[in-house]
Image: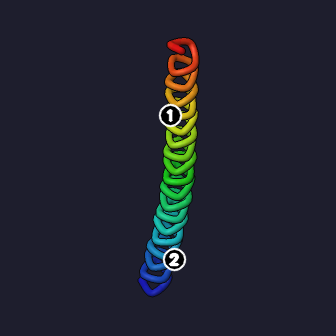
Amino acid sequence: MEREIETERETDREMEREIETERETDREMEREIETERETDREMEREIETERETDRKMEREIERHTKR
């Protein structure tokens, strides 16, 4: 009886370790996803900066061609 109880406890501890390992894996994945999101936001900001630069250049070209 004692042996069965100890075996069950060990099984429970192993399951808890597996669950914690899965949780850590989930947290790592969440961090990776957030890193990718931040990278995407940075790229979007760069694209918007390039668009603004393009618009400014177009306005300059229009100004000079109207003369």
Give the mark toward the camera: 1 or 2. 1
Label for residue 13? Answer: none
Q: Nearer the viewer, residue 13 or 31?
A: 31
Residue 60 picture location, percent across and down? 55, 26
66, above or below 24, in the image: above
44, above or below 66, in the image: below
Name the image quarter holding the N terminus.
bottom left
Pointer 1 residue: 52
Residue 42 picture location, percent across and down? 55, 46
Residue 50 picture location, percent across and down? 57, 33
Residue type (three-letter) at the residue carrying disc 1: Glu
Q: Residue at x 45, y 87 (%)?
A: 2
Label for residue 10? Answer: 2
Q: Residue at x 57, y 40 (%)?
A: 46
Q: Nearer the viewer, residue 58 or 36?
A: 58
Residue type (three-letter) at the residue carrying disc 2: Glu
Q: Earlier in the sequence, mark 1 or mark 2?
A: 2
Residue at disc 2, secondary structure? helix
